[in-house]
Amino acid sequence: MSKTLYISDLDGTLLNKKAELTCDAKAVLNQLIASGAYFTVATARTLDTVLHILGDIRLNVPAVLNNGASIYDTASGVHVKNEVIDRLAAAHLFNTLRDYDITGFAFTFDEDIQFYYENLDDEHRRAFHDERSGTYGRIYTQVQSFSELVNNDVIYFSTCDTYMRLLPVYEVLKADMRLRVEFYRDVYHEHNWYLEICAQSASKYNAVMYLREVYGFERVVSFGDNLNDLPMFKASDVCIAVENARQEVKDAADIICGANESDGVAKWLAQNVLGV
């Protein structure tokens, strides 16, 4: 039997609308891993939120974080791989954000992930900061301008705003071949869109291909719901979209499973892998 990796997106896919794993889903994942099957996650989230959400689930394959900008082995506590944005590209990114009066959160790597922001003047940005610092204990550092970070190893930038506010920035930055730019609707607030930027080499596609090569997986089965999951689908042998997925994701899928609100991923794994 071929060595298979099962890998799932989190928000809108494995998690419910409260951004939580249900008790039933946790039970299935623990049983799956205990059975010897290989399972991990691929998400736009950072390490602290992923560890909090997973709780006592002990992944047996490194997790793909920040849309592929970082790969982290939760078992050993080691960053296996980080993709750093070229410094001239980082300068272009931060100059473009300034030109369009857009800000958000920048992540750098210096032995560990460091988090920076310019201001918390926006309600969504303030809520994002307060949740992550309060619930997950994340420490943020305020800078006057992101341009102060151009000599650091920048691995990720994320912001959330309206489609029309972010669209011009997306159009400028997607033309920079040194950057990978993800632009997609927030699954929790339909009027908000996420703009996330990392190195061109950082993607769920490249991360899954790295796991294939390094860990010897012959087959990959992936689960997703949003546009940033399409690169992961391209690296997979079997692509499964949850019922609530965007139509583009469903069109790219081989299989449609149940919705995230009904534990569609966990139920598919229970029936098709565990046989229960």
Image: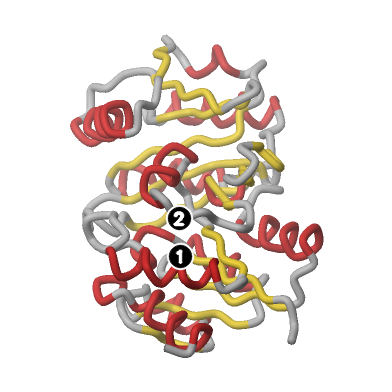
Q: Is residue 220 left or right of residue 35?
A: right
Q: Residue at x 45, y 55 (%)?
A: 57
Residue 18 % position (x, y): 22, 56
Q: Is residue 191 left or right of residue 144?
A: left
Disc 1: which residue: 30
Residue 164 % position (x, y): 31, 48
Q: In front: 260, or 158? A: 260
Position of the N terminus, as image quadrant, is bottom right
Residue 193 % position (x, y): 33, 51
Q: In front: 14, or 82? A: 14
Give, as a three-letter code, the residue at label 2: Ile
Residue 105 % position (x, y): 42, 29
Q: CA distance from mark 2 to mark 1?
A: 6 Å
Position of the C terminus, as image quadrant, is bottom left
Q: In front: 207, or 76? A: 76
In the displayed orientation, state which residue is furthest to the left. 123
Secondary structure of the residue carrying numbered label 1: helix
Question: What number is the disc on residue 22?
Answer: none
Sequence-earlier tag: 2 or 1: 1
Q: Residue at x 46, y 71 (%)?
A: 31
Give, as a three-letter code, the residue at label 1: Asn
Q: Are the residues flagged by discs 2 and 1 in contact, CB closer than 8 Å?
A: yes
Q: Is residue 180 left or right of residue 30?
A: right
Dot 1 crowding, Cα within 10 Å, few <14, some 14–19, many 20+: some
Q: Residue at x 40, y 20 (%)?
A: 139
Question: What number is the disc on residue 57?
Answer: 2
Q: Which quadrant of the figure has residue 13?
A: bottom left
Dot 2 crowding, Cα within 10 Å, few <14, some 14–19, many 20+: some
Q: Residue at x 41, y 70 (%)?
A: 225
Colour setup of the view = secondary structure
Q: Is residue 7 above or below residue 97?
A: below
